[in-house]
Image (cartoon, rainbow, N blue to C red):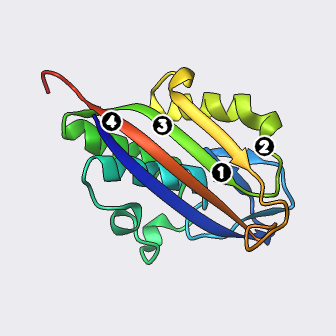
Amino acid sequence: MRVGLGFDLHRLVPGRKFILCGMEIPCEVGPLGHSDADVALHALTDAILGAAGLPDLGSLFPETDPRFAGAESSLFLQKALEMISEKGLALYQVDLVLLLDQPKLRPHYPALRRRLADLLGIPEGRIGLKAKSTEGLGVFGGEAVAAWAVAVLAEVHGA
């Protein structure tokens, strides 16, 4: 078994779609970034890459590369899953913590978990998903969204 940790943070601004786990969540603000700025998928991708000893998201998909402008973060995640497969590894489990004050995510948990299961190719029972609020304190008090992710990889026998 291998374990990786990922993190991502984006400023929230008006006029941007709020994309999370590859889904649009209704909100008056959205994360600012070069791609779709999906903090959940960015953190998960980095956790997966880190567990496999591969370069991080920013090294593989630099924000200075115009090919990735507005890109869906699910593409980065799929590439990471392909890369670990080539190393004889498979994703076993993930745990994701989101820190934000808006939008409230609890009503979206079932859909977010289903979407993650589809993207990651693992059962919903191996996906931890939690959202925490800062209750208005600090930079996250409505100004930013952050995500921490842990990924557990297993060696594929016969690879």
| 87 left or right of 78 in image | left
| Amino acid at circle 4 | Leu
- Residue located beneath label 2 in the image: 105
- Residue located beneath label 1 in the image: 98
- Residue located beneath label 4 in the image: 153
CB of mark 2 within 8 Å of CB of mark 1? yes
Q: Nearer the viewer, residue 4 or 24?
A: 4
Give x and y (percent) for residue 36. Answer: 61, 60
Q: Secondary structure at mark 2?
A: loop
Q: Residue 85, relative to residue 7: is it above or below?
A: above
| Amino acid at circle 2 | Leu
Query: Mark 3 or mark 2, which is nearer the start of the sequence?
Result: 3
Give x and y (percent) for residue 137. Answer: 80, 69
Hey, which residue is sitting farthest bottom in the picture? 64
- For the residues labelled 4 and 1, the Cα–Cα distance comes to 21 Å
- Residue located beneath label 3 in the image: 94
- For the residues labelled 3 and 4, the Cα–Cα distance comes to 9 Å
Q: Secondary structure at mark 1?
A: strand
Q: Residue 71, relative to residue 67: is it above or below?
A: above
Q: Residues within 10 Å of mark 3 (few under 14, many from 20)?
A: many
